[in-house]
Image (tube, grey):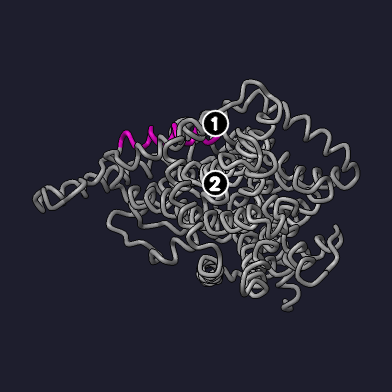
Amino acid sequence: MSHKAKGECHFNMRFKKLTVVFWVALTICTLFVIYGAVAPKQLETITQNITNFIAVHFGWYYLLLVLAILVVSIYLLFSRYSTITLGEEGEDPEFSLKSWFAMLFSAGMGIGLVFWTTAEPISHAFTLTPIHKAGSQTAINEAMQFSFFHWGVHAWAVYGIVGLIFAYFNFHKGYPGLVSATLRPILGDKMMKGPIGGAIDVLAIIATVTGVAATLGFGALQINEGLNFLFDLPSNFMTQATIIVIATILFTWSAWSGIDKGIKSLSNINMFLAFIVLIILFCVGPTLNILNTFTNSLGDYIANFFNMSLRIPQSGGEKFQWLQQWTIFYWAWWVSWAPFVGIFIARVSRGRTIKEFILGVLFVPALVCFLFFAVFGASAIYLQQSGIANIAKEATETATFATLEHFPLGFLLSIITLVVIIIFFVTSADSATYVLGMLSSKGSINPSGIVKVSWGVILALFAMIMIYTGGTQSIQNLLIIAALPFSIVIIFMIWSLFKSLSIEKPRPSNKLFISDDKYLQYRKAHQDDQTNTQTENSN
């Protein structure tokens, strides 16, 4: 048989092995892309009506859900289960702390952080404010307080709980890397291998496609506006589509070739570049103002933590519109990104204990987000208050570049920021194609190239449709809609986790206080219990 014939035979075999979950999810996503291309205005109207309904009738649900997830995460941090290893007992972590934090941050925030660090505080302070009159000092203080709130521990709790559940069942219990597999303790192995399990995995894929495509849409808009701001490149749909196509070629080639080690290196490089911009702006910008803003905002964030977490304006109007456009949107964004980020965080967290995992995922990235918002947000507000520049009139996509140009080395900082956005764009999409391939290939850690490339193309088309049907508002609508059904799955995942943990024999919190004989007895009992569980699952 010729090499060509062997290649065709191998391709056909791979093609035949594609799962029902893959075809169903791909079909749904493709139909949406076609509908968006044929009737964009109708799609925009429909999604806006659904979003308004969800915001009015389920706003309370999103607020309570995310707060409850945070409470569960804090409980696990101090519970008797905190010493359980997310892997085999005694297994060492796969990545160093530096690389781990870099990959956590790159996957969890990426483009979104660069996109909103300047635009959000300026909007809260001078456009549509949470509570007080726009431009007042109280509104400015609350602008940073609510920015911390949106990008703080609430967001990372959503990512963290899903990532923890994936890591626990995949590495500790030996289950496949599927959302449906995490529900086996409550719904049974037989049910999860049937249509219900398949439907749950399809739902996870659709939520992931929507969340990641939304981020790619934001990224394409900001890259285009950055190029327009710096080099007068036309700002229109064709340019944005071209950016997405070029990026798609890069990350699908990487996914097809199996070059996934680059994600670690690129994450480290990108965090280094992002911190370079942060440090330089801190030094050349209003340094004292930044320090005062960070300290004051952190205090306000802590003092008003529960009030912000449960706040729903009863009078409606602009204040409720603000809640819908910001808090509900963000909570939905975190939920829709949870399957993708959760699997990615789980993949890079093998070997860490539950306590290490929660401390690392919940608090360190949140603190980094606070630093970025304090430096970029306070610098923009300083320019606005001083009358040096009117950053509030800038588009969301150009606010960061408009801020940087008024400080020394501004052009250089803008170029580096643009590079950071592009790298985040490629690494997020590359990681997403892997995760989507895994979810649609029975949890395989090596999904086929055709599956990954298919999802890469769908992500690109999805992002284009989102931009074509209404830009940022369309993206926000789709996120809120996609997140609602998957949020119910998260509730069942947490229930399943606690049911499985209830039969665990956790490692003592400090083995120095027990004899070696007792510790060996504990490890043998733990291993026997794990072996029995895996045997039951295989049967």
Quarter in which the C terminus is drawn: top left
**Residue 109, percent from left and from top:** 56, 54
Going 64% across and 75% down the picture, which residue do you hit?
412
- Give the main secondary structure of the magenta stretch: helix
Q: Earlier in the sequence, mark 2 or mark 1?
A: 1
Residue 489 is one of the magenta-drawn residues: yes
Magenta residues, start to end? 488-503
Q: Give the labeled residue for mark 2.
A: 144
* Residue 63 tag number: 1
Which residue type carries mark 2?
A: Met
Residue 504 is one of the magenta-drawn residues: no
- In the rendered structure, the answer to whether residue 144 lies left or right of residue 206 reads left
Going 73% across and 54% down the picture, which residue do you hit?
217
* Residue at the extreme bottom of the image, as rendered: 2
Going 66% across and 29% down the picture, which residue do you hit?
320
**Residue 198, percent from left and from top:** 61, 39
- In the rendered structure, the answer to whether residue 416 lies left or right of residue 369 reads right
Which residue type carries mark 1?
A: Leu
- In the rendered structure, the answer to whether residue 509 lies left or right of residue 257 reads left
